[in-house]
Amino acid sequence: MVHATIRDVAREADVSVASVSRVLNGHSNVRAAVRERVQAAATALGYVPHAGARNLSLARTNAIGVMLPDLHGEFFSETARGIDSEASARGLQLLLSNAHANPARAVETLRTMRGRVDGVIIMAPDLDPQEMFGHLPASLPAVLINCRENTQRRAELRVDNAAGAEAMVEHLVAIGRRRIVHLAGPSGNTEAQARVAGYRAAMARHGLAPRVLAGDFFEEAGTAAAEVLLSELGGSNAADALFAANDMMAIGAMMRFRRAGVDVPGRIAIAGFDDVPLARLISPALTTMRVGIAGIGARAVVRLAALIAGGVDQAVEPRTPELIVRETTGAATNTKQPVSREQGQTS
Amino acid sequence: MVHATIRDVAREADVSVASVSRVLNGHSNVRAAVRERVQAAATALGYVPHAGARNLSLARTNAIGVMLPDLHGEFFSETARGIDSEASARGLQLLLSNAHANPARAVETLRTMRGRVDGVIIMAPDLDPQEMFGHLPASLPAVLINCRENTQRRAELRVDNAAGAEAMVEHLVAIGRRRIVHLAGPSGNTEAQARVAGYRAAMARHGLAPRVLAGDFFEEAGTAAAEVLLSELGGSNAADALFAANDMMAIGAMMRFRRAGVDVPGRIAIAGFDDVPLARLISPALTTMRVGIAGIGARAVVRLAALIAGGVDQAVEPRTPELIVRETTGAATNTKQPVSREQGQTS
DNA sequence: CTGTTAGCGCCTTCAG
DNA sequence: CTGAAGGCGCTAACAG
């Protein structure tokens, strides 16, 4: 016998399984003598309840499924952290699966969560929602984060990426930049698309010519973009600002510029998006749009918990990013004083 | 009826549940006609199998439990990433729980994993193993990462923290530092203890006087330590090197020194431990000991999978950290050339 | 207070 | 090839 079961304990304590169950779940209607006998038997046998069986019987798992695009990089790990902190505060376990940008696997993964979790949180900016939910019971509580436009009437959390991008362009223009280049995220990613759109809109508003470089949210794309801009640095219409669609690309570019000895922001300003923890630690510290990553994860858990408890929630909750001005677009010399706004991390 | 069950499908297709099960699991011994009828019924009903019930019946979950101290900071998120990448390559889901340095909760958490996972990976440098495993079935496959000395005869992965710390001190001495201060991790943490021990041993070997500041692995402790050292900077025996027990504290100290305009490493060298991704991105880039965080997580999954498949594994697999020399202890002026050893991230 | 008895939803012998 | 039946381990009425 590899694992003792509740029956073994019952036999050992010479009571019924019902009594064992009662004792182990702290019900009060059990005689003290029986209680002690059961507890003794349980420890003697090294009994640990089979949570899976319990879940089946209770139709309740106290776990939530989490599907993220990837765990790579600070953005997603911050999301996971936000989810985790709120979940563990509520005694919920997390069943994690990443989609790896593979729609078929994403669907499969979601299916295997059925019956193992009480609800799911899904962040899938590059997956087709119809396809994903087509194969999923409509009754499964779910909170969507930054998913594509859909017809699901699900609880959603959505960052206003377009507004954020516009705000950043406004800032760059306000500090006197004109030849602002945007380094975009992956083309199939709805967040990346919104950021490009916001960038274009703001540029148009100021009568400035947009220029978009292709990227993929990874650091290396930033390095490559910097390479391009470096080669043009002497030219008459060299860029005076690089606005990357996320922080990691901005950082990649910054590293490359630094290596080339280019003055940032003197020669070229750099801005990112997300405000990952790293953004304030690098030097010069990165100007970016704070989206409150961990806070979003935590909020998703709160809403999911309410949904699981029986609430209804079909709202799309918008989150507006906040501009965080730091050295890469601010006073280049003043590196000794943190900008006040960068204090007080959310989450 | 909220969720269709296998019976509903059977009734709809007018066959037995056994046939439905066969079809859905791809068994071959089913007539084509029946197969099609079942599939039609399943999609018509929007049937998604209840994975929990399936697990119970098969006594197999295809999930592994993961217990980490916390998800805060890059160290643990890197671990999680390493585990995740290997796990998802093997089609394993992850049931995540963090211990939050609360022994009672850690035990409870581990118990609720019984029957919901096929095995567990535990990283708990500050928990008492006897206590933790006392309440756990001995037959549950498990891989321990950086746990305290124990009598479990479990598969283990253990970083040689003492050797790593010694190597770092050797390096600092080799570049001419003598007044090397160590900023320690939390006192109850076995890894932190080993690092202090290694530091002391190496200092003694060189006849140098050790000095240990109390810390907790968080950035703020680094800031505080820098504060202390700053106040002594004029003195005759001011520190010429700060060796922090992990990267985040080293970074905290560096930020503080930078803000004070102190020349690093000219005035004081700084070194960390772990080689989190951040270490090479900050400026000046941080000298540190690479432990291959993500690689350890991945390796733990590999060993756990073998254990689950029925293998035996009671080995304690040692990992020796690798010295990564970067600007905070190297040539301060040469910021344009990456040190060769920093290429090729493990994991 | 305690035991008996049905399930929870699925898989899998075992007969046909 | 197909169906009936038992069981995975636990909980929750329902009777005593």
Image (spheres, coloured by chain):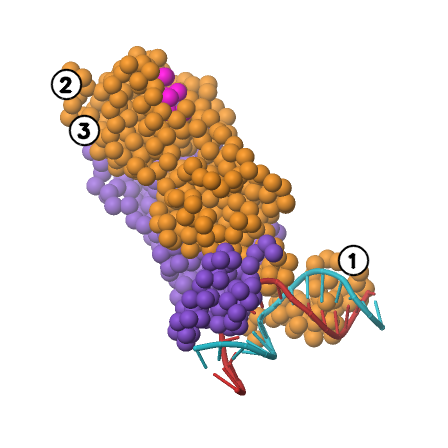
Chain colours: A orange, B purple, C red, D cyan
Main SS of residues in magenta: helix
Query: Residue at 57% of width from left, 56% of height from top?
Result: B3
Q: Dot 1 lies on which element? A: loop
Q: How far apart are marks 3 and 1 (CA)?
A: 73 Å
Query: Residue at 46% of width from left, 18% of height from top?
Result: A340
Q: How far apart are marks 2 and 3 (CA)?
A: 12 Å
Amino acid on which the number 3 mark rests in the picture: Val
Amino acid on which the number 1 mark rests in the picture: Ser
Pointer 1 local density, CA inside 10 Å: few below 14, some 14–19, many at least 20? few
Query: Label 1 belongs to which residue?
Result: A28
Give the x, y percent position of residue A20. Answer: 71, 66
| Residue B177 in view (yes/no) | no
Query: Residue at 49% of width from left, 30% of height from top?
Result: A318
Callouts 2 and 3 in the same chain: yes
Q: Earlier in the sequence, mark 2 or mark 1?
A: 1
Amino acid on which the number 2 mark rests in the picture: Gly
For this view, does A224 lie left or right of residue B298?
Answer: left
Q: How far apart are marks 2 and 1 (CA)?
A: 82 Å
Callouts 2 and 1 in the same chain: yes
**Between A255 and B158, the one nearer to me in the picture:** A255
Query: Label 3 belongs to which residue?
Result: A228
CB within 8 Å, label 2 to label 1:
no
* Residue A235 image label: 2
Span colored in magenta: A164-171
